[in-house]
Amino acid sequence: MRLRCAVLDDYQNAATRLADWSPLAAKVEVVTFDTHFTDEDALAAALADVDIVVTLRERVPFPGSLIARLPRLKLLIASGMRNTVIDYAAAEAHGVTVCGTASSSTPPVELTWALLLGLARGIVTENNALREGGPWQSTVGADLHGSRLGLLGLGKIGSRVAQIGLAFGMEVAAWSQNLTKERADEVGVELAASKDELLADSDFVSIHLALGDRTRGLLGPAELALLKPTAYLINTSRAAIVDQEALLAALHEGRIGGAGVDVFDTEPLPADHPLRTAPRLLATPHLGYVSRANYATYYGQAVENIQAYLAGSPVRRLP
């Protein structure tokens, strides 16, 4: 009898197109789900007869309560080598092996610039007007060359965003709680004296921080009030770093030039969520890591992980 493998949140039906699952055909039956399960009961019911689960990034939490309801589950594979929504202790207690995959940071870097450039040049507004017979030129673009890009975070993604900003001829500054002048100098950017200074002086602010106790709610009403009325805020990291109510107020009241957002407190975003109709907002449905190359890596290495597990030698184990 073949094992049963479920691939979760395969919205684009990409899992079986971008990886070769045929090496598993004799031993594993693969089923994909192209919709998101919104509650634990529905997910537990869908996975009741599943031995292996492949989940993308941190879209689906696997708390101990869920793992306990999946007696057949033996292997859980998450894309990337870091996942904060899996209860590893519970997995171990129930005999579930957890593995990860490689993941490229290039796609979120590129999406950051897609959002930034889309905002700066009014791409969506002008495209819609052109298609709908609206006014010919209704926006005046913001210049990148000579403007100031402020980065919250200068890690693997932030540093690459910085390099592109420098290539555009921007002044680039960065700040985080642990950022040193040596690291800023290494990347070739200015170390901002404080978070408040970075926010007040920047024409574009892009967030590249991990979510944790120190960064949750890092940008609240007081911090957003420091931004210039022409400034743009980009968030491709985690929604909870920015106070969502404060961001909505700033957008509706025109206190900032606009925002580019790829992450949300609830995903998929509910149909009636106020961010769907907020002015001055360019939003994408968490596409940061969604690219052909990344998906080929995620699912290709998921196949490798399953093969290794079946051979008795699991690879890329988490945490």
Image: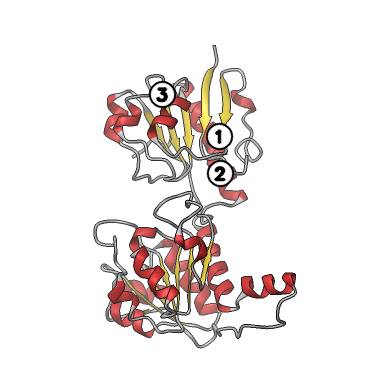
Across and down, in percent, residue 206 comes to 43, 71
Alpha-carbon span between mark 2 and mark 1: 19 Å
Q: For the point 60% across and 49% down, which residue is it? A: 293
Assign a secondary structure to mark 3: loop
The dot on residue 297 is 2
Residue extending farthest front: 272
Q: Answer with left or right where residue 297 lies relative to residue 316.
A: right
Instruction: Name which residue type carries label 2.
Output: Thr
Q: Earlier in the sequence, mark 3 or mark 1?
A: 1
Residue extending farthest top: 1
Instruction: Name which residue type carries label 1.
Output: Phe
Compare residues 30 and 34 and report the one nearer the observer: 34
Across and down, in percent, residue 135 comes to 70, 81
Q: Earlier in the sequence, mark 3 or mark 2?
A: 3
Q: Are marks 3 and 2 in contact (CB under 8 Å)?
A: no
Across and down, in percent, residue 151 comes to 40, 73
Assign a secondary structure to mark 2: helix
Q: Quadrant of the N terminus?
A: top right
Residue 121 appears anywhere in the view:
yes
The dot on residue 73 is 3
Residue 314 appears anywhere in the view:
no
Of circles 3 and 1, the one toward us is: 1
Compare residues 10 and 243 and report the one nearer the observer: 243
Q: Are marks 2 and 1 in contact (CB under 8 Å)?
A: no
Establish if 70 lies above or below 167.
Answer: above
The dot on residue 33 is 1
Q: For the point 55% across and 32% down, which residue is it? A: 303
Instruction: Name which residue type carries label 3.
Output: Leu
Establish if 242 lies above or below 9.
Answer: below
Q: Answer with left or right where residue 211 lies relative to residue 259.
A: left
Describe the colour scheme in one phrase: secondary structure
